[in-house]
Image: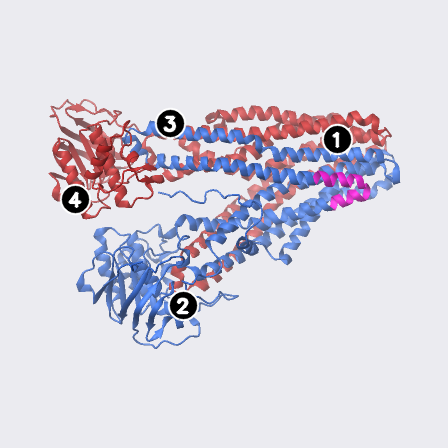
């Protein structure tokens, strides 16, 4: 079942300007000037050629009608042909250059978002972790590509060429330049601002109806069996028709506003031509203002308005890019809340993983973890999620962390791997954990998450990133320890893919693969968070047994989090967590 | 992709209406274009030839009039496109919903239901662009282009012939280049999707990457991959942008050719300025619709893809009869108060999940059907409900249950709670014309949910309740129907899978009471508590698959 999306429609709060946080995201999406300028220059050359082509043709024909010796037309003939070619050639160049710049920026954009996500994950992103919101975030990041291609490029080129044309016409006949400017401004203001207001109003009217319809349709489609069985289907469909009918009638009512923008721009374009005629005809013969010049100032506005037509779609693309940027900025805030330990920033070439950060060295050999009055809070929460936890964990220990749901078991796990900061004391071999780099703590304390994330790759790759030097024999060995050897063999070996988010493997198999991965990384302390949460009840016991027997060897300490009982003979002791009283 | 899918006209009469209105408006727009070009070329020619402003006032006023008319037509065309899109979407949506009601849940189970819901809501919105941007241009290509070309041929044959020669080059080149790059483009599109999924994978698995200390290296890989992708894509784009290049070149070069040729003929006096300017203004207009069709092709493809999915649903003629009528079965002397399955067999493609199931369930008993998962317990219930076609016969109280009968004698709760937005009471009384608050309270208590507030408001799909609460409300809904309509049969499919032992015990007590009232109570479950409490346990075993 899919949940209704809460961000179905972007509100048009301030339809034009981004918030400061949104601006920071937009900066990531826009290529630097040195990359975007060549494409921009080619774009201006192409659009200017289109205007020049019409101007040149108009001049050529009108001048030719005066029947001068043909050699006087030579330059115009060459100009017409050259502008026809350069318009298409520069357009081709523009598209290549601007796409290249945009693709280059896409890498930087993804890296920038990644760099902001990195210190927050996972504790600072609890909202974003929901599947649909995560997908939304990635789609928003993809949509930000439109900023250079569909917003900046067309706005800059059309704006620049329109301005150049106004100046050009002004030089030939100031009055005609003025009327062209006037028409452009009216088209710009009325055609875009009014149209935006109209479409925002229509969106406000339609969005709730659309949402209501989507919810109703989803309920009917997903529960068709229930509705049929209870004889309620006809009634429900009648209700759905009413909603659908309201949406249809609202759409029809709103349709009158839809064409306003196109009509206004068409009207302004025509007016520009008519006004140019009115300005130019009386001026004919004065100051050397000739027939050919008249044809130029009268016809150029037509070409300019063709250029102007790029602006409305660019502005609507801008509205989408802007709301994508705002959503990204909200989902991935800059800066790290106090509840999350600070991590070193992603360095420039980011080739090195943080495991090699200078910090107090940990003694090799058996590791002891001591918690004393440990407490932790989630970002934005008013009360701590765990408080006053004391525990000693040494090699060979197999501890069951019990407690009702909401008692803070997962919080404790996230704190121990330094996804959350703590109060009180958390010592690893006598060294306070906050004096170590978080990545260094994570080399000692490993975690098998409640919902392990499998990467959309082969089983081999999903294991290898825990230890790159592992041979296939190592991998098969560790799969055997978690009871997956036969399964892997029957499924086509290590090259079998696990599917997007592990879709091709069952919940229990995913847990076992994740455990194999953790064993391969050889963490001295391993936390396993609710391994049976997504597993059939009958299989849960076997899985817990397998985990404890596979992990509880070689001087490793295991902390097993589970809300269901664990056979006592498998454990060294049990710690029961209760939620701190607010 | 066909330029215009005839199925659209077949399933949505509003599309036919739009084509008609659009054609009329397209014709009007063509006339306006011609009038504008003619009046403008006349004004310029007369002015250049020395006519005074005063004598041109009429022509310019007419030109201004055409400008206004043209803007009105533009507006009308957009309004018609928007109305057409809204009406077509509404018609297709209704048609799909009718289809769903007609075909029933078993047919829907073969579709992806979330996909169906998306297609008929937001998916169809992609038709907006198809109607607003693509279809009008397609109409103009069919209407304006031939008229303008004929007009140019008549006014200045040389220019007309130039256009006739160049025009076909555009689609031919676009198709050629399109074919040449199609395969590579699809590969690149897939690569782009993979890259995007890869980013999703890295972002979603960030915590895991951090645990294993691989977060930074993953970032480097991300940049490398994007960079490689860029390199390959730019190679493809160099070719595929050529189609746009040809499109523009054909348009602008033919205008240039026409302008130069007109200029030369003006010099030797074989052509008049008025005609020359008129033809020069018409030439780009002849190319414009075709260029727009090319440019809007992708927007159109999105809309048609959504419509395509709707057509697939509407034209799915894989008709499975709801149930086959048993032929030549003797009327068995079944006693009153007995539900009898007689050789019930369900075929699912090649497989036969239920093969010759024969059992009797008696009133006054709590019967439990048990068996390993995947053995077809829910399929059996589906057959009982009339959702799943089956061979064999079903008898109740000595009467044969005809395949298409409405199941007014049955109250049921499925594995998924299937709740709706609204109060707990509206959920529990689903399908009942009246609300009996006392009965609601009883039903909730017997379902082990006596502590739940009946006025509590639920969100879409029953959001706001825990899994266990939702399951109990669903059970209460079946119990309410059983009590309100006095149905002789109550069937619950895995009603306690999310319940704790206390709630399960309460539910079992409630069901025992219902059975004691003389009803046939059947529960599908493998929970020990139910197996212990049952008066009768039917074990369903796995059948050999064909």
**What subunit carries mark 4?**
B
Q: Which mark is residue A238?
A: 3
From the viewer's side, name the closer residue of B347 and A413: A413
Image coords of residue B108 (percent x, y): 34, 34
Q: Position of residue B152 (x, y in %)?
A: 72, 28
Instruction: Determine crowd level at label 2: few under 14, some 14-19, many 20+ residues with C-alpha closer than 10 A.
Output: many
Tell me the shade of chain B: red
Q: In the figure, A252 relative to A371: above or below?
A: above
Q: Which dot, 2 or 4, sits closer to the camera? A: 4
> Which chain is the one coloured blue?
A
Query: Residue at label 1?
Result: B279
3 or 2: tag closer to the N-terminus: 3
In the image, are marks 2 and 4 on the same chain? no
Q: Main secondary structure of the magenta part?
A: helix
Q: Are marks 4 and 1 on the same chain?
A: yes
Identify the residue at image location x=83%, y=25%: B55
Looking at the rendering, the stretch of residues picked out in magenta corresponds to: A164-184
Percent across and percent down for residue A227 are 31, 32
Q: CA distance from mark 3 to mark 1?
A: 58 Å
- Name the residue at 33% across, 72% down: A427
Q: Chain of mark 2?
A: A
Asked if labels 1 and 3 touch by Cβ distance under 8 angstroms, the answer is: no
Task: Give the CA distance from mark 4 to mark 1.
Answer: 90 Å
Whichever of labels 4 and 1 marks the residue nearer the N terminus, that label is 1
Q: Which mark is residue A323?
A: none
Pointer 3: residues within 10 angstroms few (<14), some, or many (20+)?
few
On residue A439, which mark appears?
2
């Amino acid at each position: 079942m899919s949940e209704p999306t809460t961000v179905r429609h972007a509100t048009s709060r301030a339809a034009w300007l981004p918030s400061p946080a949104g601006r920071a995201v937009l900066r990531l999406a826009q290529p630097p000037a040195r990359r975007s300028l060549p494409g921009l220059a080619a774009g201006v050359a192409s659009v200017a050629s289109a205007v020049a082509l019409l101007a040149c043709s108009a001049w050529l024909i009108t001048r030719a009608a005066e029947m001068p010796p043909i050699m006087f037309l030579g330059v115009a003939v060459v100009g017409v042909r050259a502008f026809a070619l350069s318009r298409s050639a520069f357009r081709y160049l523009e598209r290549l250059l601007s796409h290249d710049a945009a693709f280059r920026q896409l890498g930087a954009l993804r890296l920038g978002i990644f760099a902001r996500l990195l210190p927050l994950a996972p504790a600072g992103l609890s909202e974003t972790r929901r599947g649909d919101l995560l997908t939304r975030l990635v789609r928003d990041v993809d949509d930000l590509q439109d900023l250079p291609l569909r917003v900046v490029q067309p706005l800059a080129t059309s704006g620049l060429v329109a301005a150049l044309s106004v100046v050009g016409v002004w030089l030939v006949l100031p009055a005609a330049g003025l009327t062209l400017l006037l028409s452009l401004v009216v088209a710009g203001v009325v055609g875009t601002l009014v149209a935006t207001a109209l479409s925002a109003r229509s969106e406000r009217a339609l969005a709730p109806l659309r949402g209501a319809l989507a919810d109703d349709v989803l309920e009917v489609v997903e529960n068709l069996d229930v509705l049929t069985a209870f004889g309620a289907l006809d009634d429900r469909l009648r209700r759905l028709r009413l909603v659908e009918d309201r949406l249809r009638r609202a759409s029809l009512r709103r349709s009158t506003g839809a064409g306003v923008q196109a009509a206004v721009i068409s009207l302004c374009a025509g007016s520009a031509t008519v006004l140019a005629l009115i300005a130019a005809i009386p001026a004919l013969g004065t100051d050397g203002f000739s027939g050919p010049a008249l044809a130029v100032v009268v016809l150029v506005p037509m070409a300019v308005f063709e250029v102007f037509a790029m602006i409305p779609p660019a502005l609507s693309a801008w509205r989408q890019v802007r709301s994508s940027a705002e959503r990204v900025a909200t989902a991935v805030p800059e800066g790290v809340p106090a509840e999350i330990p600070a991590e070193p920033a992603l360095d420039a070439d980011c080739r090195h993983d943080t495991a090699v950060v200078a910090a107090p060295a940990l003694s090799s050999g058996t590791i002891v973890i001591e918690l004393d009055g440990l407490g932790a809070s989630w970002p934005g929460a008013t009360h701590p999620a765990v408080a006053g936890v004391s525990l000693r964990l040494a090699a060979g220990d197999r501890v069951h962390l019990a407690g009702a749901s909401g008692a803070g078991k997962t919080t404790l796990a996230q704190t121990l791997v330094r996804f959350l900061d703590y109060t009180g004391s958390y010592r690893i071999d006598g060294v306070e954990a906050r004096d170590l780099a978080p990545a260094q703590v994570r080399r000692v304390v490993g975690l098998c998450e409640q919902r392990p994330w499998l990467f959309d790759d082969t089983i081999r790759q999903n294991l290898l990133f825990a230890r790159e030097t592992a041979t296939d024999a190592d991998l098969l060995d560790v799969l055997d320890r978690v009871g997956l050897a036969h399964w892997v063999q029957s499924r086509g070996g290590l090259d079998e893919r696990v599917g997007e988010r592990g879709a091709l493997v069952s919940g229990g198999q995913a847990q076992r693969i994740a455990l194999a991965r953790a064993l391969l990384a050889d963490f001295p302390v391993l936390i396993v968070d609710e391994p049976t949460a997504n597993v059939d009840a009958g299989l849960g016991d076997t899985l817990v047994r397998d985990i404890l027997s596979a992990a509880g060897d070689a001087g490793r300490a295991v902390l097993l989090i589970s809300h269901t009982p664990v056979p006592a003979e498998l454990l060294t002791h049990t710690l029961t967590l209760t939620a701190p009283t607010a | 992709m066909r330029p215009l899918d005839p199925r659209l006209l077949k399933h949505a009469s509003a599309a036919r209406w739009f084509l008609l209105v659009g054609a009329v408006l397209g014709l009007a727009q063509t006339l306006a274009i011609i009038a504008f070009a003619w009046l403008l070329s006349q004004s310029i020619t007369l002015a250049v030839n020395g006519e005074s402003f005063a004598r041109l006032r009429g022509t310019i006023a007419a030109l201004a009039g055409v400008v206004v008319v043209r803007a009105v037509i533009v507006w009308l065309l957009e309004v018609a496109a928007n109305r057409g899109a809204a009406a077509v979407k509404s018609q297709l949506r209704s048609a799909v919903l009718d289809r769903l009601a007609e075909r029933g849940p078993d047919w829907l189970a073969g579709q992806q239901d979330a996909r169906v819901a998306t297609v008929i809501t937001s998916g169809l919105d992609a038709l907006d662009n198809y109607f607003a941007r693509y279809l009008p241009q397609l109409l103009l290509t069919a209407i304006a282009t031939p008229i303008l070309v004929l007009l140019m041929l008549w006014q200045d044959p040389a220019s007309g012939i130039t256009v006739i020669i160049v025009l076909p080059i555009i689609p031919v080149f676009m198709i050629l280049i399109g074919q040449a790059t199609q395969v590579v483009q699809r590969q690149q599109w897939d690569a782009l999707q993979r890259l995007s999924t890869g980013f999703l994978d890295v972002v979603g698995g960030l915590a895991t990457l951090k645990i294993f200390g691989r977060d930074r290296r993953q970032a480097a890989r991300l940049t490398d991959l994007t960079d490689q992708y860029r390199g390959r894509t730019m190679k493809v784009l160099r070719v595929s942008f050529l189609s746009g290049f040809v499109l523009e070149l054909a348009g602008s070069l033919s205008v240039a050719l026409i302008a130069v040729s007109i200029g030369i003929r003006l010099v030797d006096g074989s052509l008049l300025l008025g005609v020359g300017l008129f033809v020069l203004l018409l030439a780009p207009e002849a190319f414009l619709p075709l260029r727009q069709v090319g440019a809007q092709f992708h927007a159109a493809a999105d809309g048609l893809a959504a419509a395509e999915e709707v057509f697939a649903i509407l034209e799915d003629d894989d008709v499975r009869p709801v149930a086959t009528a048993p032929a030549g079965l003797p009327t068995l002397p079944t006693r009153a108060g007995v539900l009898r399955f007689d050789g019930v067999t369900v075929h699912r493609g090649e497989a036969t999940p239920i093969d010759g199931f024969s059992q009797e369930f008696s009133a006054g008993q709590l019967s439990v059907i048990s068996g390993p998962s995947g053995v077809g317990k829910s399929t059996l219930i589906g057959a009982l409900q009339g959702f799943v076609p089956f061979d064999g016969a079903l008898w109740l109280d000595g009467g044969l249950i005809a395949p298409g009968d409405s199941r007014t004698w049955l109250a049921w709760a499925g594995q998924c709670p299937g709740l709706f937005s609204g109060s707990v009471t509206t959920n529990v009384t689903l399908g009942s014309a009246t609300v009996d608050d006392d009965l609601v309270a009883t039903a909730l208590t017997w379902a082990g949910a006596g502590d739940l507030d009946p006025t509590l408001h639920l969100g879409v799909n029953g959001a706001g309740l825990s899994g266990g609460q939702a399951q109990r409300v669903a059970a209460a809904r079946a119990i309410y129907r059983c009590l309100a309509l006095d149905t002789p049969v109550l069937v619950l499919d895995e009603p306690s899978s999310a319940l704790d032992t206390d709630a399960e015990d309460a539910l079992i007590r409630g069901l025992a009471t219902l059975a004691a009232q003389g009803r046939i109570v059947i529960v599908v479950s493998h929970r020990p508590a139910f197996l212990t409490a049952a008066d009768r346990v039917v074990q369903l075993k796995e059948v050999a698959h064909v």
